[in-house]
Image: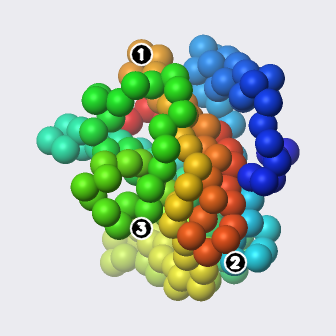
């Protein structure tokens, strides 16, 4: 669905991605799909209801997309610090999250074996034994806001050589 990161993108391709995001915001939500390559294997997360949290004290948006199969869990965690100080509707360069002084958004990607347990009250607890993990190294996140909802597009290269591209929409 998305372009490999080594493919040169034209303004037209960025326009189409932006249009899809804006239409999704106007209709209430967009698909939440991130796909690419993690540790030389295809990676995909489609989440109809991603978790999100806005830390008002730290002004930090966190978005978590996850998908589970019978044996595995795939997760994408998007972190955008000091969101109110950022210019939206244009690409924001990403970092790794390892140097807080850079103050750049970052993404963590993981794949692992699923482990389900149940609390004494019967609540299902999902955990994961991580088998593959990577952080963003280069690329960008583009973020749009409409009446408290956020939609975004990610196009990043991972520190282990893989890549991710995708869209998300949340109401923190």
Badge 1 density bin: few <14, some 14–19, many ≥20, Cα 10 Å: few
> Earlier along the polypeptide chain: callout 3 or callout 2?
2
- Measure how far apart labels 3 and 2 are at the Cα level: 33 Å
Pair 3/2: label in front: 2
Badge 2 density bin: few <14, some 14–19, many ≥20, Cα 10 Å: some
Q: How is the image coloured?
A: rainbow
Checking the image for residue 172, the label placed there is none
> Earlier along the polypeptide chain: callout 1 or callout 2?
2
| Above or below, comparing residue 143 to residue 94 in the picture | above
Residue drawn at (58%, 21%), measured in percent from left and top?
25
Along the viewing direction, whichever of 138 and 2 lies nearer the viewer: 138
Q: Quadrant of residue 60?
A: top left
- Measure how far apart labels 1 and 2 are at the Cα level: 38 Å
* Residue where numbered disc 2 is placed: 39
Measuring from the top left, give residue 156's x and y in whole percent. 62, 53
Q: Secondary structure at mark 3?
A: loop
Checking the image for residue 147, the label placed there is 1
Q: Quadrant of the N terminus?
A: top right
- Measure how far apart labels 1 and 3 are at the Cα level: 33 Å
> Earlier along the polypeptide chain: callout 1 or callout 3?
3
Contact between labelled residues 3 and 1, with CB atoms less than 8 Å apart: no
Measuring from the top left, give residue 53's x and y in whole percent. 34, 44
Residue 90 is at least partly visible in this image: yes
Measuring from the top left, give residue 150's x and y in whole percent. 48, 29
Along the viewing direction, whichever of 45 and 95 lies nearer the viewer: 95
Badge 3 density bin: few <14, some 14–19, many ≥20, Cα 10 Å: few
All told, the count of numbered labels is 3
In the rendered structure, the answer to whether residue 78 lies left or right of residue 168 reads left
* Residue where numbered disc 3 is placed: 123
Residue 47 is at least partly visible in this image: no
Q: Quadrant of the C terminus?
A: top left
Residue drawn at (53%, 26%), measured in percent from left and top?
90
């Amino acid at each position: 669905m998305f372009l490999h990161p080594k493919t040169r993108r034209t303004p037209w391709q960025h326009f189409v991605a932006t249009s899809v995001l804006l239409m999704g915001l106007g209709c209430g939500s967009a698909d939440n799909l991130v796909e690419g390559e993690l540790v030389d294997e295809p990676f995909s997360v489609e989440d109809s209801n991603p978790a999100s949290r806005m830390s008002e004290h730290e002004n930090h948006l966190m978005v978590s997309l996850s998908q589970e199969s019978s044996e595995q869990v795939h997760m994408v965690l998007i972190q955008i610090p000091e969101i109110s100080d950022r210019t939206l509707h244009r690409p924001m360069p990403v970092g790794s999250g390892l140097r807080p002084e850079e103050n750049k958004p970052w993404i963590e990607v993981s794949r692992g074996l699923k482990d389900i347990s149940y609390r004494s009250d019967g609540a299902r607890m999902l955990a994961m034994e991580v088998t593959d993990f990577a952080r963003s190294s280069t690329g960008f996140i583009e973020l749009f806001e409409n009446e408290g909802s956020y939609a975004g597009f990610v196009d990043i290269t991972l520190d282990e050589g893989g890549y991710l591209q995708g869209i998300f929409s949340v109401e923190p």
